[in-house]
Structure formats: C-alpha cells, structure tokens
Amino acid sequence: HGGHLEEVERLREAAEQAKLELERQREASKSLAEERELKMLEEEAEQRRMANALRDEWARLEQQRRTVTLIQHSLLRASDDRAGCVEMNLDDGVVYDDEQDLDELWDLDWAGLETETRPPSATAAAASGGALPTTPPQSVAAELGAPSTSGTSG
C-alpha cells in the first residue's frame, strides 16, 4: 500500500503542477489578449486621428478651391466689364515737325493708295470694307517727309 500512496501523491503533485501550468498559460493568454486589444484600440485611435487630419485637410483644400473659384469669377467678371474696350497705342513713335503734315496723313484715302505695298490680307480687308493697315505705305510716308522705317526712300 505504501507504493500506492506514493503513486497517488505523485499524481496529485503532477495534477497540481498541471493546474499551475494551466493557470500560467491562462494568464499568459489573457495578457496576450489584453495586449492585442490594447494594440487594436491604439490603432483605432490612430486611424481616428488620421481620419480627422484627412477631414481637416479636405476642408482646408475645399476652402482653397472655393477661394480660387471666387478669385477666378472675380477676374472673369472684371475682364467682362472691359470686354468692349480695346487699348491701342496710336503713337508709332514718329515725330512730325509740321502739324499740317500730320493732318494730311490722316486725311488720305487709304483705299486709293498703292495696293501692292499693302499685305494681301489688308487688300482683301479693304475690298470687303474691313479694317485697313494702321501704317501708311512707305511711298506716302516719304512724300510727306516722314522718316523711313525700312532704311530706303521711295
């Protein structure tokens, strides 16, 4: 019977050891589960922060888009207000000594002047009643005593 009692005692100790080992494993498993849960909560919080940051950035970009659109509309509106206006420089840099020469130059019938000195587009425009060139032919400028822009007198 003594050997039997020792066997029962050894089995009891083995069961106690198994129970303690099982308890340690349970604690380790519980600890791992808590760590995983904590990690998931931290990741979720980080995702929320990222989502908030993205939402804020989206709002900022949307505000910039609205601002650019307002500026664009303002510029378009400003350009539409001047749509009928064309700014032209009428002074070609030529200085006339005599006021009468200048008056004669403007009183010329441009359509009756040498058509070969005008570019084909100007000749076509004159034939259709359109706009004529803004500078007189070289021969007319030379007749009035204006300096020649081509370097030759005609």
Image: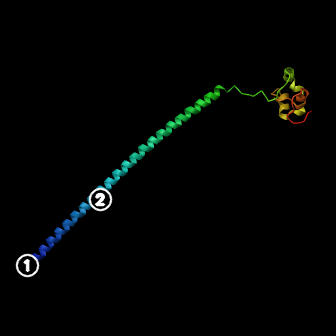
Residue under the image location 14 percent in, 74 percent down: 10
Where does residue 149 sit, x and y in percent of width and height?
85, 34
Q: Amino acid at mark 1?
A: Gly
Query: Based on the displayed image, in which of its 4 quarters is residue 119 positioned?
Result: top right
Residue with the mark numbered 1? 2
Against 98, residue 2 (above or below) is below
Query: Based on the displayed image, in which of its 4 quarters is residue 124 positioned?
Result: top right
Where does residue 105 sit, x and y in percent of width and height?
86, 24
Against 3, residue 20 (above or below) is above
Q: What quarter of the picture does the N terminus occupy? A: bottom left
Query: In this orientation, which residue lies closer to the viewer: 9 or 105?
Result: 105
Residue with the mark numbered 2? 32
Query: In this orientation, which residue lies closer to the viewer: 11 or 134?
Result: 134
Task: Please count the marks in the image.
Answer: 2
Q: Residues within 10 Å of mark 1 (few under 14, many from 20)?
A: few
Residue 18 bears which disc, if any? none
Q: Residues within 10 Å of mark 2 (few under 14, many from 20)?
A: few
- Secondary structure type for disc 2: helix
Query: In this orientation, which residue lies closer to the viewer: 142 or 46?
Result: 142
Residue at the farthest front position: 97
Q: What quarter of the picture does the C terminus occupy? A: top right
Q: Is residue 42 left or right of residue 123?
A: left
Point out the tag, 2 or 1, that comes first from the N-terminus. Answer: 1
Q: Amino acid at mark 2?
A: Leu
